[in-house]
Image: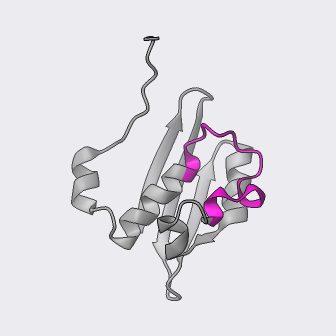
Amino acid sequence: MATVISRMRTCGKTHRVTVTMNGEGNFDVVIESDCPKVRLFGENLRYVTFEDITDFDKSRINRREIRGDLSPPCLSPIAVLDAAWVEAGLLSRSLVKRAKENTVEFSEEG
């Protein structure tokens, strides 16, 4: 099981994404959020395949019928990918433990 927390300071919402490899070779996805749009995304998604987490263009995560009304800057789909990569062993648990977080920083330049 791997869990990633996304804190969207621009909208004040928090999303907790947990991904667990199931016995069928897929990954179960559970999303807890105080955002109704992200909760619906989680209900629509429910699972991902290995191809979903390695082929960004074809991934179910990016399908309009799965994403619903999520705004493009929402980090919850990326949180799903991050958690799935950790659970699949594509991203080292020791590395993410050391790194602790990735950030998106807004710049006043330009």
Q: Position of residue 94 (x, y in %)?
A: 22, 59
- Residue 109 location, x and y as percent? 43, 11
Q: Is residue 63 magenta?
A: yes
For the residue pair 73 and 38, the one nearer the viewer reads as 73
The magenta stretch spans which residues?
A: 60-77
Residue 41 placement: quadrant: bottom right
Q: How many marks?
A: 0
Q: Position of residue 59 (x, y in %)?
A: 60, 65
In this orientation, which residue lies closer to the viewer: 21 or 67? 67
At 73% across and 63% down in the image, what residue appears?
44
- Quadrant of the image containing the N terminus: bottom left
Q: Nearer the viewer, residue 48 or 30?
A: 48
Is residue 102 found inside the magenta-colored segment of the image?
A: no
Q: How is the image coloured?
A: one colour
| For residue 13, above or below residue 100 | above
* Residue 79 % position (x, y): 50, 51
